[in-house]
Structure formats: structure tokens, C-alpha cells
Image: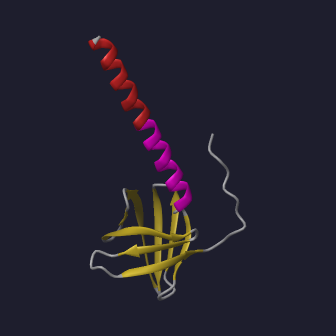
Amino acid sequence: MGVLLTLLVAGLVILYLRSNRKARVKWLQNLALPGQWVSQLNGASLSLSGGYDSGEYRWQTGGTSSTGRWNYRGAILTLEGEQSRAYTVQLAQPGVISLLREDGTAELFHKQSTNVVPLAKR
């Protein structure tokens, strides 16, 4: 009886973890962070390349530019380069995200459309 109960609990935990992972992958695909993002506030450009949750970034504001690695965990987008910055990401609508700074100010970014079609990984 104890073995059966243990197997049942283990099966439920595995089912929960699998569905949680699938939901996270679907959220990351809907968020679609990799690409070119332009600020509505000042025209700054944020280019994210790599996978759905990490990769390389390039931030351009006016004449200045910074590069480094980006990482998305939970709802936090971390840019690690010359200086480390963290933003809370909120999806306003498809193709529009809000980056909330630690000081509480938010900035809207619109995704630039391109003619490049991403191919699915196998």
C-alpha cells in the first residue's frame, strides 16, 4: 500500500513539473524576447539574440552602445555587460513589452518586425 501511494505521489509530481515546464515554454514563445526592440520613450534600441531565455544583447541609446549577455528568469530580465541592470518584464500585448526598472519607472518597447522567419529547432 505504501509503495502504491509513493508511486502515485511521484507520478503526480512528474505530471505537475511537466505541465509547468510546458507552460513556461509557451509563455517564453508568446513573449518572444529575441529580436529588435525600440523604446517608445526615447528611441533607444535593445537587440536581443539567442534563445528564448538567454543570449547576447546590444543596447543603443543616442550615440552610446553597450553589449553583453542577457538572461530571463521568472519575470526578471537581467542585462550583464559593462554594468548589470535588472528589469521586470510585463507583456502589454504581442510585440509590446514594458520594462520596469528597480526605481519603479517603466518604459514601453515595441518589437520591430523583420522579414526573417525563425525556424523551429529540432
Viewer-side residue, 19 vs 112 = 19
State which quadrant residue 64 falls in.
bottom left
**Residue drawn where x is 40% and y is 58% of the image:** 72
Q: Is residue 49 above or below residue 43?
A: above
Q: In this view, does 122 lie above or below 59?
A: above
Q: In this view, does 19 lie above or below 38?
A: above
Q: Where is residue 21 in the image (x, y as percent from the top left)?
A: 45, 43
**Residue drawn where x is 50% and y is 43% of the image:** 22
Chief SS of the magenta region: helix
Viewer-side residue, 40 vs 47 = 40
Name the quarter where the N terminus is drawn.
top left
Q: Does residue 44 show up?
A: yes
- Left or right: 2 with respect to 30? left
Colour style of the rendered protein structure: secondary structure
Q: Farthest residue toward the right?
A: 115
**Residue drawn where x is 40% and y is 30% of the image:** 14
State which quadrant residue 77 falls in.
bottom left
**Residue drawn where x is 67% and y is 51% of the image:** 119
Q: Position of residue 115 (x, y in %)?
A: 72, 67
Viewer-side residue, 16 vs 87 = 16
Q: Where is residue 58 in the image (x, y as percent from the top left)?
A: 47, 70
Q: In this view, does 77 lie above or below 8?
A: below
Name the quarter where the C terminus is drawn.
top right
Q: Farthest residue toward the front?
A: 1
Number of callouts in the render? 0
- Left or right: 71 with respect to 45? left
Magenta range is 17-32
Q: Does residue 51 show up?
A: no
Asked if residue 89 lies in the magenta stretch, the reply is no
